[in-house]
Image (spheres, rainbow, N blue to C red):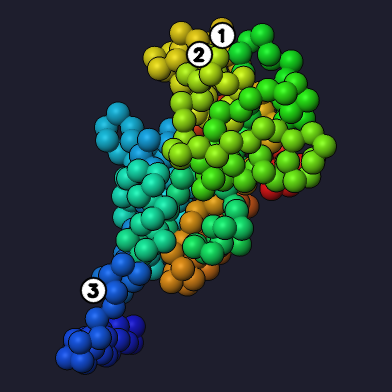
Amino acid sequence: MKIKQLIKFASVSIAAAAILAACGNEPDSSSASSSTPSKDGVTVVKVAYDQAGKPMTFLDENGNATGYDVEVMKLVDEALPEYEFEFVGTTNDDLLIGVEQGKYDVGVKNAFWTEERTQKYIFPQEFLGLSSAGLVLKKENEHIKDLGDFASAGFTLAPIAANNAQYTVIAEYNEANPDNPVKLQAGEEFTVDVVQWVNEGRVDGGVQIEGSFTGQVLTEGGPYYHLKDEVVYNEFAVIKTWPLFNKKEQAFADAYDKAIAEIKKTDALRELSKEFYGKDLFEVLESVNR
């Protein structure tokens, strides 16, 4: 019965496509979704990931997609037999533009929620993971523990692009603390080399994700491992992270929600957090307010 239904569905789909082609009503490729049903009824979806976002999303030594976000999406893929995930490595900027325009169905990049992004993407009901955000400072300033301390000291912050969610995090702090705001400057680039800027004294501090700091500074072989005794990382928030779905992929986002909700009933995400971040960030989930 199932095979007959699939054949009937395929026949109707082909006929419909022929009619559209004859009428010249082809969809705009710049906004159309990239998901494609295969012959066996399984929908192939393109999952974009920032291949330079270690430890969240990156290429391993064998050229394979991995990282916390990627491995979680692989678990979701296993839980959804009606979908086949095709992981596509790309840049941060291409991921954001590509998901918005339909080049990719979903993208993962340690993404934070912002109101502006809800206009461009579907945010599912279930978050993907947690990320530690903190201040990179010179060792002599390690007494600066949070944004309030940083603002009170009158310190300068490395510029952050206005479309970077980290900018929104600082802006939200400033809105909530008008009498003690952080000096926030919008940068031209999505990210700057925070560790280098702080080490050179161009700024007093910068916002960075702990995973990135660990990979750059605390991991032997990292580009700034030689500065491990010169700069420090002080966490000021743990923030939920999300996959970004193309606006036409509500059904896919709903399927993701069901799958990840079941996965969260196990210890799988906690284990991945420990594997890629070196600690179980879910231990502080109850205190996470963003």
Residue 230's label in the rendered image is 1
Residue to which mark 3 is pinned: 39
Residue to which mark 2 is pinned: 200
Left-right relation of 82 to 205: left
Q: Nearer the viewer, residue 169 or 269?
A: 169
Q: Nearer the viewer, mark 2 or mark 1?
A: 2
Q: Nearer the viewer, residue 96 or 54?
A: 96
**Mark 1 Cα within 10 Å, few/some/many (few <14, many 20+)?**
some
Left-right relation of 5 to 172: left
Q: Do the residues labelled 3 and 1 touch (CB within 8 Å)?
A: no
- Give the CA distance from mark 2 to mark 1: 11 Å
Residue found 54% across the figure and 45% down from its top: 162
- Give the CA distance from mark 3 to mark 1: 57 Å
Residue 25's label in the rendered image is none
Name the spot of residue 30 as percent of width and height, x first: 31, 67
Name the spot of residue 259 as percent of width and height, x first: 52, 60
Left-right relation of 249 to 277: left
Residue 11 seen = no
Q: Identify the mark nearer the N-term, 2 or 1.
A: 2
Name the spot of residue 174 as percent of width and height, x first: 73, 41
Picture layout, residue 72 above or below residue 245: above
Q: Do the residues labelled 3 and 2 touch (CB within 8 Å)?
A: no
* Label 1 secondary element: loop
Q: Identify the mark nearer the N-term, 3 or 1.
A: 3
Left-right relation of 147 to 69: right
Q: What residue type is labelled 3?
A: Lys
* Label 3 secondary element: loop
- Give the CA distance from mark 3 to mark 2: 57 Å
